[in-house]
Amino acid sequence: MPIICKSVYLRVPLSIIYRALKDTRIEKLFPEFFIGTTRRIAIAKENKEIGFETRTDDGQIHIKEVFVLKIAGENSTAVTYTTETNIENNPVVDSIIYTHVANIIYALLMLETGYINGLLQADRDLPSSSNKN
């Protein structure tokens, strides 16, 4: 399978994105989704880059994922996501990888939505100076 590379710009601080990508709670809470695979952090450059290697337990499929994070302006982060596998021309594996890439991008967009909604809620919860007597 060729290398897939996607970029997205998020209005979320770089450090929050890095911590979210590094978070392993989903693997601990729902181990049934990870049966037959081993996933480990292969690259960890704090707040810059994080990479994962995932392998099936039988060693047939190897997936490499790398997230590169860069500040992109005053309040956004550029995330470049690259993934590749050792399997070529297999429509089943290709379909799984493309679905996985879509899910990763969707999760990043939901992280942004939650972050922005949290900021808006915090602004609403602050006492305004116009309400003072």
Image: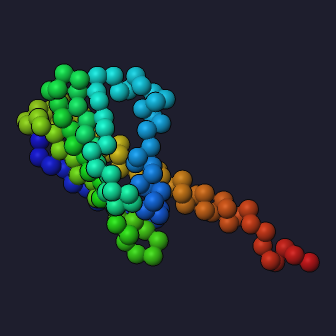
> Is 24 on the left or on the right of 38, as rendered?
right
Q: Is residue 87 left or right of residue 47?
A: left
Of 52 and 80, the residue lying toward us:
52
Q: Is residue 81 above or below residue 102?
A: below
Closest to the observer: 48 or 131?
48
Q: Residue at x 54, y 57 (%)?
A: 115
Which picture quadrant has residue 61?
A: top left
Q: Position of residue 27 (x, y in %)?
A: 42, 32
Residue at x 40%, y 75% (from the top left corner): 73
Quick check: 66 above or below 32? below
Measured as percent of width and height from the top left, residue 119 is found at 60, 62
Q: Quadrant of residue 98?
A: top left
In percent of the image, x 14 and y 27: which residue is there? 60
Can you give x and y, in whole percent of width and height, for residue 104 in the image?
35, 46
Q: Quadrant of the C terminus?
A: bottom right
Residue 72, percent from left and from top: 37, 71
Work out which residue is located at the far left of the displayed protein and give it.
Answer: 89
Identify the image quadrant of the N terminus: top left
In this rendering, position of residue 107 left or right of residue 8:
right
Rendered residue at 14%/33% (across/down): 91
Colouring chosen for the image of the structure: rainbow
